[in-house]
């Protein structure tokens, strides 16, 4: 019987070989493969739903929550969305081979940098089967091989999607092993992936904080991390308060369970008396519970006193921490102390303060007069994303096609030798 180690290493070796081939494939060939992937998902929607039904039945038997079952479900509409997503990737510019800049040295040597694929990317994720198709499409377009290890709750769905994508690659003349799925549900399979440093170049975990911390602790391979999104909006003394209310409402209530939702509202003391009762009334219409500092509680009687833990919490719910601050400096210090390097916004009409906030606040996206909900690859013009990185090596923020590449130096000479 094949051991977990043997099974995972076989997949990893094959992916490493495939990476060399897909890394030098031209744009037309990659796009043809992606087109075949999208067509395959549409053509085999009935089979995908049958395989997904097995996961759904097993999930109900295990007592998965309604929210988890909803994320797991594949419908005709969701399968179409996966196919549409792949076609959107086709339309994106191919970053591979792009020469970023060239400069001439005093000896006449021309030096530059060229984009190249990372190699083999391992993606470890939970629940959503659509991640299988999204991640595969981005990796193929950027010339990378990908090894996918989804959660055991979606094993039938993920395996079926991966097989369709592999068939499409092969029919297009590219190696099927450029997209591989670990079909073993044993947790030991993840441990073997995380130790396969000779084959895998980067690990991207997608899921809850527990999964990401576990992967980061065990991995011998560089990991793109995103533990949580403790996102702040600071309402400055010079904010347009009429504009600030809908921005805060959008940031908190549009989708409270996502990583770019606002979790803490900071308000300058000079704006607090007018702004806090007004915004609290609007938030209250949507069932938001406020947990505030003493000044907040005095201005908004319905607010509950905040604990120290509330100011570093990712609630992922209709709960908002609120603090009145004496200055922008105090707001930035609060963000430094409690933030997670994810997303912060300042609402102000003061250009100098806005620019200082942008320069000094250290998060993957810093906004002026806009909702935190814009920290998303599609919203920022990347076309698609494979995740959001809150670490700075080698990417910071939403990761699109360019973030799935690195650069190498190139040089052109005319007989130069070093003296």
Image: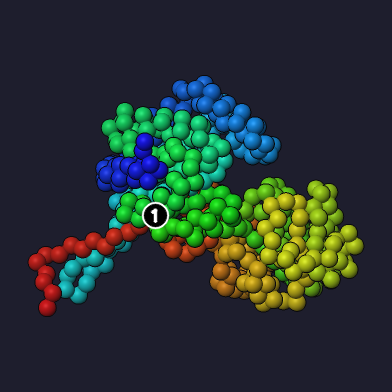
- Closest to the observer: 376 or 347? 376
Task: Point out residue 206 in the picture as x, y percentages from the top left corner.
Answer: 53, 49
The residue located at (52%, 26%) in the rendering is 51
Q: Is residue 6 above or below residue 279?
A: above
Q: Position of residue 189 (x, y in %)?
A: 44, 45
Q: Is residue 236 above or below residue 279?
A: below
Q: Where does residue 160 sit, x and y in percent of width and height?
A: 46, 30
Figure disc tally:
1
Residue at the spot 36% in from the left edge and 36% down from the top edge: 1
Q: Could you tell whether 128 is left or right of 30 in the image?
A: right
Residue extending furthest front?
1
Q: How is the image coloured?
A: rainbow
Foreground of the two, 352 or 245? 245
Whether residue 331 is visible, yes or no, is yes
Task: Identify the residue at image location x=65%, y=32%.
Answer: 60
Residue 355 visible within the image: no
Q: Residues within 10 Å of mark 1 (few under 14, many from 20)?
A: some
Rendered image quadrant of residue 340: bottom right
- The quadrant of the image that shows the C terminus is bottom left
> x, y percentage for residue 221?
40, 58
Q: Secondary structure at mark 1?
A: loop
Residue at (31, 31) in percent of width and height: 170
Classify 83 as above or below 350.
above
Does 163 sit left or right of 350 as displayed?
left
The residue carrying mark 1 is: 195
């Amino acid at each position: 019987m094949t051991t977990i180690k043997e099974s995972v290493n076989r997949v990893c070796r094959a992916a490493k070989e495939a990476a060399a081939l897909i890394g030098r494939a031209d744009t037309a060939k990659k796009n043809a493969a992606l087109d075949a992937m999208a067509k395959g998902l549409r053509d085999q929607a009935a089979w995908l739903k049958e395989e997904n039904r097995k996961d759904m039945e097993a999930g109900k038997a295990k007592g998965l929550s309604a929210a988890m079952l909803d994320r797991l479900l594949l419908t005709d509409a969701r399968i179409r969305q996966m196919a549409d997503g792949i076609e959107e990737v086709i339309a994106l510019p191919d970053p591979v081979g792009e020469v970023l800049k060239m400069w001439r040295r005093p000896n006449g040597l021309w030096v530059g940098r060229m984009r190249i694929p990372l190699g083999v990317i391992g993606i470890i994720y939970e629940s959503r089967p659509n991640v299988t198709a999204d991640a595969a499409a981005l990796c193929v377009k950027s010339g990378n091989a990908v090894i996918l290890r989804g959660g055991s709750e979606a094993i039938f769905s993920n395996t079926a999607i991966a097989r369709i994508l592999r068939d499409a690659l092969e029919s297009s003349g590219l190696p099927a092993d450029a997209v591989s799925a670990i079909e073993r549900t044993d947790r030991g399979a993840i441990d073997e992936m995380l130790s396969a440093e000779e084959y895998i170049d980067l690990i991207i975990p997608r899921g809850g904080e527990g999964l990401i911390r576990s992967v980061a602790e065990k991995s011998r391979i560089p990991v793109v991390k995103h533990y949580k999104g403790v996102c702040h909006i600071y309402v400055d003394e010079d904010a347009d308060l009429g504009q600030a209310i809908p921005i805060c409402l959008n940031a908190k209530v549009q989708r409270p369970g996502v990583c770019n939702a606002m979790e803490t509202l900071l308000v300058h003391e000079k704006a607090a008396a007018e702004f806090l009762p007004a915004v609290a009334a609007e938030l209250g219409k949507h069932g938001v519970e406020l947990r505030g500092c003493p000044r907040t509680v005095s201005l908004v009687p319905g607010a509950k006193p905040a604990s120290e833990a509330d100011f570093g919490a990712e609630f992922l719910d209709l709960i908002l921490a609120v603090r009145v601050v004496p200055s922008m400096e105090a707001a930035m210090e609060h963000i430094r102390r409690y933030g997670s390097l994810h997303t912060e916004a300042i609402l102000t009409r003061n250009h100098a303060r806005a620019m200082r906030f942008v320069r000094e606040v250290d998060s993957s996206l810093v906004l002026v007069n806009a909702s935190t909900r814009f920290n998303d690859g599609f919203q920022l013009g990347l076309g698609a994303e494979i995740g959001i990185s809150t670490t700075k090596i080698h990417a910071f923020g939403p990761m699109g096609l360019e973030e799935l590449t690195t650069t190498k130096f190139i040089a052109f000479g005319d007989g130069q030798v070093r003296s």
